[in-house]
Amino acid sequence: MDSPDLGYTPDLFVRPDDKVRLDRMVRAVSDEQLSVAFISHSDALLDHYGRLVAEHLRRTSRLAVEIYSPDSTDALIDRFNRILASMSVSEALKIEGSMAPSRLLLVYDGRATGVREVQLLARLLKDFPGANTRVALLLHAHADAPKKVEAFGKRMVHWELSLPSTSEKQALLERAASQGG
């Protein structure tokens, strides 16, 4: 089955199959209510694909996309308490039919967010499904990244973004030059 065209400009992708993969990530968040993680050695790739997924979700879904950088466990708990503040405990625990607005917390600085904070965030999302909140982690590929993804279990889809090859870099430069970039 062909992937539906979700409105991306093909010129924004390093590889042709990146569009299909990004479409998958968007569907995971918007349709399947899963969290996602992008993992790379390149901060520029993480920023680029994080922006693409955020822009698309803002345009095409009812999801509120928020940039989030928890700098401590207390800040994380405070943010989650604000999400839960307007609902009862039974609403927050409700698995189906939540009336809470759908929300995506986009965590740009994955290196600054410790494993402990990510594990706590995963636990809060699991324990309070009525909060209707998902996470997109932009993780630098280092030793902590697998532990952070594992904290979400089957509730997270991840994509390891590899650096472009020399020929892919050349093709991108040629495309940019042909478009006046």
Image (cartoon, helix red, strand yellow):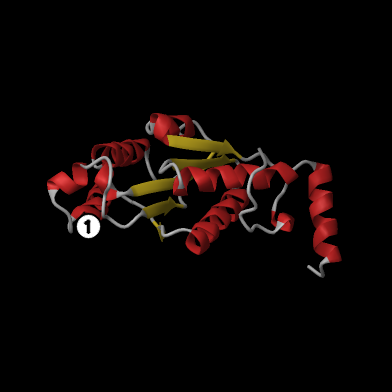
Q: Looking at the image, can residue 125 be seen? A: yes
* Residue displayed at 62% across by 42% down: 21
* Residue displayed at 33% across by 51% down: 71
Secondary structure at badge 1 equals: helix
Q: How many numbered dots are placed on residues in this image?
A: 1
Q: Is residue 180 left or right of residue 66?
A: right
Which residue is the extreme one toward the bottom? 180
- Going by the numbered disc 1, the residue's amino acid type is Arg
Q: Quadrant of the C terminus?
A: bottom right
User: Of residues 65 and 67, which is closer to you in this image?
Assistant: 65
User: Of residues 61 and 83, which is closer to you in this image?
Assistant: 61
Q: Quadrant of residue 148?
A: top left
Percent across and percent down for residue 113 are 39, 45
* Residue displayed at 47% across by 30% down: 146
Q: Looking at the image, can residue 110 be seen? A: no
Task: Report which residue position mark 1 lands on.
Answer: 82
Percent across and percent down for residue 133 are 34, 49
Q: Is residue 67 left or right of residue 12?
A: left
* Residue displayed at 84% across by 64% down: 177
Which residue is the extreme one toward the front? 1
Percent across and percent down for residue 67 are 41, 58
Q: Residues within 10 Å of mark 1 (few under 14, many from 20)?
A: few
User: Of residues 86 and 174, which is closer to you in this image?
Assistant: 86
Q: Quadrant of the N terminus?
A: top right
Query: Against 68, is 168 above or below?
Result: above
Q: Quadrant of residue 32?
A: top left
Query: Against 116, is 59 above or below?
Result: below
Percent across and percent down for residue 167 are 84, 44
